[in-house]
Image (cartoon, rainbow, N blue to C red):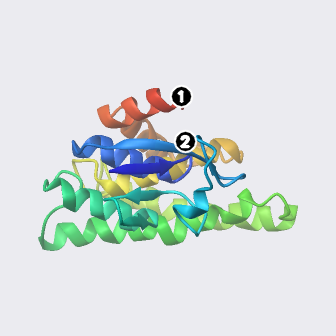
Amino acid sequence: MILYTTPGACSTATHIALEASGLDYSTVLVDLRAKRLESGLDYLTVNPKGAVPALRVDEDEVLTENMTCLVYIADKSGSAALLPLSGLERYRVLEWTNYVTTELHKGFGPLFNPAASDELKDATKALIAKKFDYVEAALGGAGPFLTGAHARICDYYLYVILRWTDQFGIDLVRWPALAEFRRRVAAEEPVARVLERTGLGA
């Protein structure tokens, strides 16, 4: 498989999942502003949406959208480590992964828009804070990860979103369980390897 990715972007979660899966893969870096690959080729020929991740699963097929790529990798690995193969626990992991996608990932959108007003950015941060309150309470009742004792695709995705708080001045001191969660996930071996290879800090 080939992962088209930008370090620090949401595709980092997909990168971590691939690293954790044990599947063979390679990565190609994408310049999201220029929509170019590191080779200079037009990224829109790979993914017309112009976003990352894109996951080439064979010569003719490319998957896009982070949640889809995460679930595909987990299922392709044939292991329950990333996503249980059946039962309610599988759907709990999917429930959390979808929450991160729709409520947290999407929620940060206005902060990435340089044209957004200060008022919009302040309102966005207030909404993110409410979402963090919910996750903080959930971690306090479950832990150490979102669905229990093992890091799953939902945890890797949430970890990447939490990294964005540094960029936008959102201090996790208000959410100690989330801060500890971030440290715990960063220490997971596949996460540490991806961070080292991509030059990202924890």
Q: Would residue 123 be found to the left or right of residue 152 on screen?
A: right
Q: Position of residue 145 (x, y in %)?
A: 31, 50
| Location of mark 1 (residue) | 199
Q: Residue at x 13, y 56 (%)?
A: 78
Q: Residues within 10 Å of mark 2 (few under 14, many from 20)?
A: some
Q: Would residue 76 be found to the left or right of residue 176 on screen?
A: left
Q: Quadrant of residue 141?
A: bottom left
State yes or no: discs 1 and 2 in contact (Cβ < 8 Å).
yes
Q: Position of residue 183 (x, y in %)?
A: 43, 35
Observer-nearest residue: 47 or 105?
A: 47
- Whether residue 83 is visible to the viewer of this picture, yes or no, is no
Q: Residue at x 18, y 51 (%)?
A: 81
Q: Position of residue 153 (x, y in %)?
A: 32, 55
Count of residue discs: 2
Which numbered marker is on residue 119? none
Q: Position of residue 34 (x, y in %)?
A: 72, 52
Seen in the picture, residue 198 relative to 137 is either above or below; the reply is above
Which secondary structure lies at badge 1? loop
Q: Quadrant of residue 108?
A: bottom right
| Location of mark 2 (residue) | 7
Seen in the picture, residue 23 relative to 189 is either above or below; the reply is below
- Whether residue 101 is visible to the viewer of this picture, yes or no, is yes
Q: Residue at x 73, y 58 (%)?
A: 111
Amino acid type at circle 2 is Pro
| Disc nearer the start of the sequence (1/2) | 2
